[in-house]
Amino acid sequence: MSLPPIDIALKRLSHGADLPLPAYATEGAAGMDIVAAEELDLAPGARHAVATGFAIAIPDGYEVQVRPRSGLALKHGVTVPNTPGTIDSDYRGEVKVIMINHGDTPFPIRRGDRVAQLVVAPVQQARFTEVVDLDETVRGAGGFGSTGVLSR
């Protein structure tokens, strides 16, 4: 059972004219594909905030996550380094996708190319309460790699 969609206002910017709006590629897709509104060649090791040509107004209680496209990551080593990137509900600027090229050749990004996907997610805010001691657990303070590693 899927939840009903929420409405997100979208403002197309002048350099986003005639580009497709974010859209789900299939009925079961979790992310909406978004396209580049600019052209560049992303050099190996380089990062760039790729323009999308639109801004959005996300309702309170939600965020929009920016995620990489798996095909770009697998085939070309091009990904989104701050995955998932978060667009907060009070941000009204242009949506941009920070991309990095981990490959060994320049990667061309052309206007209209699908560069990332957006996933809408609910947000639960929290409060921190300072305490003297934390409750005990089996794991305790075991950190990175402390679970799932077989003893040898």
Image: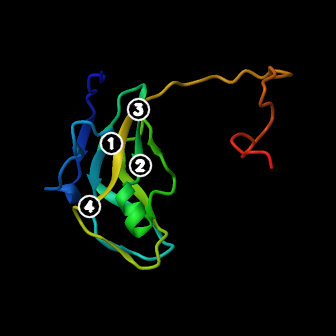
Evaluate if marks 1 and 2 touch, with contact meaning CB atoms under 8 Å apart: yes
Q: Is 53 placed left or right of 105 in the picture?
A: left
Say which element carries label 4. loop
* Callout 2 secondary element: strand
On screen, residue 129 versus residue 67, left or right, reads right
1 vs 4, front mark: 1
Mark 2, residue position: 67
Residue pictured at 35% horizontal, 59% vertical: 71
Instruction: Say few, some or many: other residues with alpha carbon within 10 Å of mark 3 (under 14 / 14 to 19 / 20 or more).
Output: few
Cβ–Cβ under 8 Å for marks 1 and 4:
no
Residue 116: x %, y % from top left:
35, 53
- From this view, report whether residue 38 is shown above or below residue 135: below
**Pointer 2: residues within 10 angstroms few (<14), some, or many (20+)?**
many
The answer for how far apart the CA atoms under marks 1 and 3 are is 10 Å
> What secondary structure is marked by label 1?
loop
* Residue at the spot of label 3: 121
Image quadrant in which you'd find residue 73: bottom left
Residue at image mark 4 = 37
Instruction: Tell which circle, 4 or 3, labels the residue nearer the N-terminal end.
Output: 4
Identify the residue position indicated by label 1 in the image.
Answer: 31
Q: Distance between the residues labelled 2 and 3?
A: 12 Å
Q: Which of marks 2 and 4 is nearer the N terminus?
A: 4
Distance of label 1 from label 4 (alpha carbons): 19 Å
| Label 3 element class | strand
Which comes sooner in the sequence, label 2 or label 3? 2
In the displayed image of the protein, which residue is found farthest to the right?
Answer: 132
Q: What amino acid is found at the position of numbered circle 4 in the picture?
A: Ala
